[in-house]
Amino acid sequence: MKLSKAFIPTLKEVPNDAVIPSHILMLRSGMVRSLSAGIYSFLPLGYKVVKKVTEIIRQEMDAIGGQEFHLPALNPREIWEETGRVEAFGDTMFHVKNRDYVLAPTHEEIMTYHAKGVVKSYKDMPQIWYQIQTKFRNEPRPKSGIIRGRQFLMKDAYSFDTSWENLDTSYKLHDKAYRRIFDRCGLKYFIVGASSGAMGGSRSEEFMVKSDAGEDTVAYCEHCGYAANVEVAKSVVDGAPRTDKSEEIKEISTPNVKSIDELCQFLGIKETQCAKSRIYICEDEPVLVLMLGNDEVNETKLATVLPGNLRPGHPDELKQITGADAGSIGPVGFKGRIIADLRLKDANNLYSGANKNDYHIGGIDMQRDVPTVEYFDLRTVQEGEGCTRCNSKLEVFKAIELGHIFKLGTKYSEAMGANYLDESGKAHPIIMGSYGIGVERVIACYIEQHYDERGIVWDKTLAPFQVHLLGLNMKKQEVIDASEKIYNDLTALGYEVLFDDRTDAQAGFKFNDADLLGLPVQIIVGDKNLKENKVEVKLRKTGERSTVELNELYNRVKELLS
RNA sequence: CGGGGCGUGGCUCAGCCCGGUUAGAGCGCCUGGUUCGGGACCAGGAGGUCGGAGGUUCGAAUCCUCUCGCCCCGACCA
């Protein structure tokens, strides 16, 4: 491709609405342009990278027996009603105004619909079906360029099996394919145990890239490799102590004391002597959730303990249920289910609210005074706590989710009646898995991990072109002749060459554009070197330059790009 | 949906607080010329209903009200 004819609008200055490096560089290098919040157009250069990534994905999905589909993004709403996901997605799903259609945010329903009609016998399985297609989600707040958009490209795959054991096999195949995909893309990633959330299912893992631009928080142990989304992460942390002697229960006047910090200061006690109370409403029933000190309730963990419709109690409800406002609520005298975090197990001499405004209760013995309590892991892991595997200190940081694999089970097949007959002619719901990769996120994450102050640094695998050929002064005939010949020869040899043949751009201008676009190999043709039958070869990654004899050039290029 | 910021030529921004010729700069673009290995120079030129609507005023980019859009933080998130 000749740059003089290409539409690659580079930007010298940083666009005003981009903040993170990948977004800035994708705009500056002319890969994408924004159309509206969270909606991006891929320009030719950016789309070339999309094609590189999707080709790698296709190869690896095909390698595990995947078959590529192309499903419609426009779906009849009623099919989504069958699984209750119109309500589950709520405002996140786009609805078409003038017909009863929705824009698909994912495709479990549609794939299951097709499986239902065709996969009828145990002999028809396993199946792995995938597609690379645009998804639509009405994100309340798109951000970070293409990392979180309202429309995005996703590789989504679905497996259909006859048993949980066979699902294990399909799941592991995807795990393997995903590792190969992200390895080939040159990403530094790690895998975390994750929550299945509204997707349903028994087990899921996320492929993550560490990044401040990320929206997930991950606990990670450098020592043993333990990694988990904080939604599900566990840690080793001391519980509240139980001493030999339980004090008498006593009511204490604590005027205007609301927070745990205030209580500690007021009474001169430690955080770990306090039990914090939160009221949740689960399926219309109030539940008191007790946490030690300032530990925060992890609502993802709570949701697994309290299945069904779950929400925090409203302030006016609190008063009605407990007789007190938030800050003075406690377990003693609370009528209803009480659950507590494991750190509180069997502790005594605790302080908590008295269910009466401006009063707390001291001397609480969990065994004696809260006999109906049930204990669960309900807290969110904090930086520096012990790893449950090796007791090293956990790191907690932000990460971007690149891919997610789920063991779905029968949620969709049961809801939609996708059954198969086993050897004995008995009907069972198909056991499903679902597996996603955010294609644009692969690109953004790659750039987040591979850039410098001058621009993007592409590896040959994802680079939109492998060679950036610069004809420095394209008004001199010898430069024109030599660079045109190199361009034609390398193209004929099968390389993708971007040829800066512009006559009106100065050398410095071309160098800067070349570094910004970041193609791995630059070949610089200038009249001085040409007099000695030489050109310069520069590696973008290291900045290393060397002059090469013209008759050695193609061997050198082959060497560098093999 | 709460909080904050911002909308002025294609891009980055100044001007607004304190209303007053014809709305500016740099970059980019067009024409001609000189340059030509790290974002050149000279000369000339095109391009803007100052996001939109309403209001105050003799007069509004500037003050007031409403509204739309974009970015950031939070909430939400498969």
Image (cartoon, coloured by chain):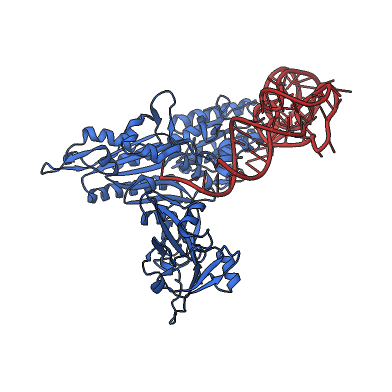
Chain colours: A blue, B red
Q: Compare residues A271 and B12 and report the one nearer the observer.
A: A271
Q: Is residue A27 left or right of residue A157?
A: right
Please determine whether, in this image, residue A145 is positioned above or below residue A264. Answer: above
Task: Check the image and name the residue furthest to the left.
Answer: A424
Rendered residue at 49%/28% (across/down) = A488
Q: Compare residues A158 and A377 and report the one nearer the observer.
A: A377
Residue A496: tell me if it is visible: no
Please determine whether, in this image, residue B49 is positioned above or below residue A19. Answer: above
Rendered residue at 32%/46% (across/down) = A174
Please determine whether, in this image, residue A404 is positioned above or below residue A242. Answer: above
Where's residue A262, x and y in %?
Answer: 59, 66
Rendered residue at 52%/58% (across/down) = A326
- Identify the image quadrant of residue A562: top left
Where's residue A253, x and y in %?
Answer: 57, 70
Where's residue A112, x and y in %?
Answer: 28, 37
- Identify the image quadrant of residue A378: bottom left
Q: Compare residues A127 and B55 and report the one nearer the observer.
A: B55
Q: Is residue A523 left or right of residue A154?
A: right
Residue A249: tell me if it is visible: yes
Q: How many marks?
A: 0
